[in-house]
Amino acid sequence: MCDKYHFYRLLEVSQNKKKIYICSSYKPKLIPYSMNNEWLILFFLVGAIFVGLVLIFSGIVAPKSINPQKFEPYECGIPTVGTTWLQFNVGYYLFAILFLVFDVETVLVFPWAVVMKETGMVAFVEIVIFFFILGLGLLYAWKKHALIWE
């Protein structure tokens, strides 16, 4: 006899059509609304409408200023001399991309460290491959002198 925390679950139906039930604590969760296409489309439509309404509302409520100084490029309060459209050295771009790569790598290592004990050797091999590829990228950047700040 099952108590209030357990229920009978159908184990199997034998060849003579006899049903065998066992007492089990496994209770399947019933989801009242499955995530089918209609709900997913409705979710995105409601989200898009909400974002649109917020943008329209902020455009109506926000204070407006029609000051000519508002449209000037701002650089530390000092008026600009000459053209404000300058070409930057590509080295800054490479340095920023390298920073982003290693920053994202740090973000990915923290969740890996949390589940490493549970997943075992598979996770260790995956992270060794990940660090190897990252090391190859660092070696490539070093050979191209992207790490030299000039």
Image (cartoon, rainbow, N blue to C red):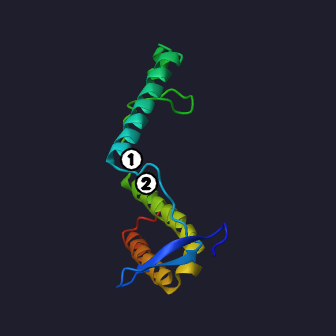
The residue that disc 1 covers is: 88
Q: Residue at x 66, y 66 (%)?
A: 4
What x and y, as percent, mark residue 3? 67, 70
What x and y, as percent, mark residue 19? 43, 78
**Label 1 crowding class (10 Å Cα cut-off): few <14, some 14-19, many 20+?**
few
Q: Residue at x 49, y 80 (%)?
A: 123
For label 2, the SS is: helix
- Is residue 149 visible to us here? no
Which amino acid is tagged 2? Tyr
Q: Nearer the viewer, residue 123 or 101?
A: 123
What x and y, as percent, mark residue 108? 51, 66
Q: Residue at x 47, y 59 (%)?
A: 100
Q: Nearer the viewer, residue 38 or 97?
A: 38
Residue 98 against residue 40 in the figure, above or below: below
Quarter-wise, where is residue 93 in the image?
bottom left
Contact (Cβ within 8 Å) of mark 1 with mark 2 = yes
Q: Residue at x 59, y 72 (%)?
A: 25
**Viewed as shown, does residue 133 lie left or right of 116?**
left
The residue that disc 2 covers is: 92
Quarter-wise, where is residue 77 in the image?
top right
Q: Nearer the viewer, residue 132 or 81?
A: 132
Quarter-wise, where is residue 46 in the image?
top left
Which amino acid is tagged 1? Phe
For label 1, the SS is: loop
